[in-house]
Image (cartoon, rainbow, N blue to C red):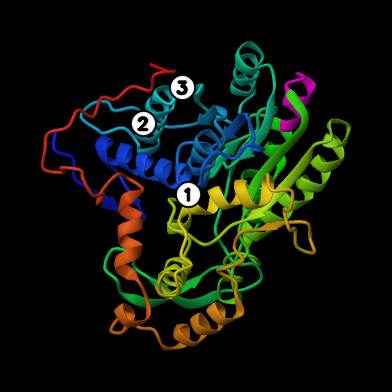
Amino acid sequence: MIVTPKIRGFICTTAHPEGCAKHVSDQIAVVKSGGILAEGPKKVLVIGSSTGYGLSSRIAAAFGSNAATIGVFFERPAEDGRTATAGWYNTAAFEKEAKEAGLYARSFNGDAYSDPIKAEVIEAIKADLGQVDCVVYSLASPRRTDPKTGEVFKSVLKPIGGVYTNKTLNTTTGVVSEISIEPAQGDDIAQTVAVMGGEDWELWIDALMAAGVLADGVQTVSYSYIGPEVTWPIYKNGTIGKAKEDLERVQQALDEKLAPLNGKAWVSVNKALVTQASSAIPVVPLYISLLYKIMKAEGTHEDCIEQMDRLFRDRLYSGAPLPDESGRIRVDDWEMKPAVQALIAKRWTEVNTENLAEFGDFAGYQSSFLRLFGFGLDGVDYSADTDTAVSIPSIG
């Protein structure tokens, strides 16, 4: 079939298999250009490995350190005339590239919050790897089922305490407008923390420790975002911010649990980027558009793969993680430079639909969004008929 992008709101309902494969290949090339990291991890589990920062983490570990990797995700194969999800095609391409490079790669498709998936993964580690020396936790989901009680939690992106009004960007039309978001009500905060906080990260580490599959010196990392004050009402000080605070609580708890293994837990604060998750947050797409314009102009722009490659090479496995006063690794450091943020603050007050092209990189935003689903990549013939029924070798 001929596959074209079909965008509905902040998601694309189609994905291009060859385009996703090219996107993965391009990321691998970035990592390989830095050479092999001799002191890097060798056996890595990535929970949430099929898109965004999780996918880039898996690529950075495999092709930057020759690591064996196990990936966990929840994606949909092609069926009934529909394409597979981008994450399915990404993983199929990753496994193909890993096999050609002589690297072990095994994937599990299912509910990563569930006990059965945890058990399956642990058995695979025991059988194939013995132990893992790095665990990346990069899940992003709107809902979570508690594995013990069966209760379903749903996250919301809301401010706390009052209505929040600010500028936002329609990522389809390029219109800058004002948006008002109602504050959290009832148990919105608790529900969001249950989904996007640190509880499941801790459950994974607990299960892996109990099974004896964490190596001495193991490191585990989960991802967060802080951002500038203009986004704080909807992010840092909103419901999602409370979830990220819980993530930091769990990081400290895991540090204590991993101490007997000489292990370490980290929260890495990453740069604002176009991902399937960030596209859904009001206000943030406009901020990203302004940020891209400035960082590209000064030559400091990074995408997911450059961020994760820098995290592994310069922080986690360099001997110099450079934590901030709260113990977090900051690879958002270039984004948060005072000069960059001062210029964004100035342009934020001035930007509107008419001058968006002058102040922001809307075209770059849209291009980044489409690449997430395999569209707009050089060297791919999008007019050609393509087979959408692609299998993941370790799954079938």
Asked whether 206 falls inside the magenta stretch, the response is yes
Q: List the residue tagged with mark 2.
A: 93
Give the vertical position of 208 relative to 337 (above or below): above
Measure how far apart labels 1 and 3 are at the Cα level: 21 Å
Give the vertical position of 343 relative to 191 (above or below): below
Quadrant hosting residue 186? bottom right
For disc 3, the neighbor class at 10 Å (few under 14, some 14 to 19, many from 20) is few
Which is nearer the eye, 311 or 209?
311
Query: Residue 305 — which label?
Result: 1
> What residue type is disc 2 on?
Ala
Query: Residue 102 — which label?
Result: 3
Give the vertical position of 131 relative to 295 (above or below): above
> What residue type is disc 1 on?
Ile
Give the extent of the magenta segment: 205-213
**Residue 187 vs residue 369: left or right?**
right
Asked whether 1 falls inside the magenta stretch, the response is no
Residue 200, position in %: x, y? 68, 37
Residue 124, position in %: x, y? 60, 15
Secondary element at image label 1? helix
Q: Are marks 1 and 3 in contact (CB under 8 Å)?
A: no
Quadrant hosting residue 224? bottom right
Residue 17, position in %: x, y? 27, 35
Main SS, magenta residues: helix
Measure how far apart labels 2 and 3 are at the Cα level: 14 Å
Query: Residue 316 — which label?
Result: none
**Residue 337 vs residue 263: left or right?**
left
For disc 2, the neighbor class at 10 Å (few under 14, some 14 to 19, many from 20) is many
Give the vertical position of 366 relative to 155 (above or below): below
> What residue type is disc 3 on?
Gly
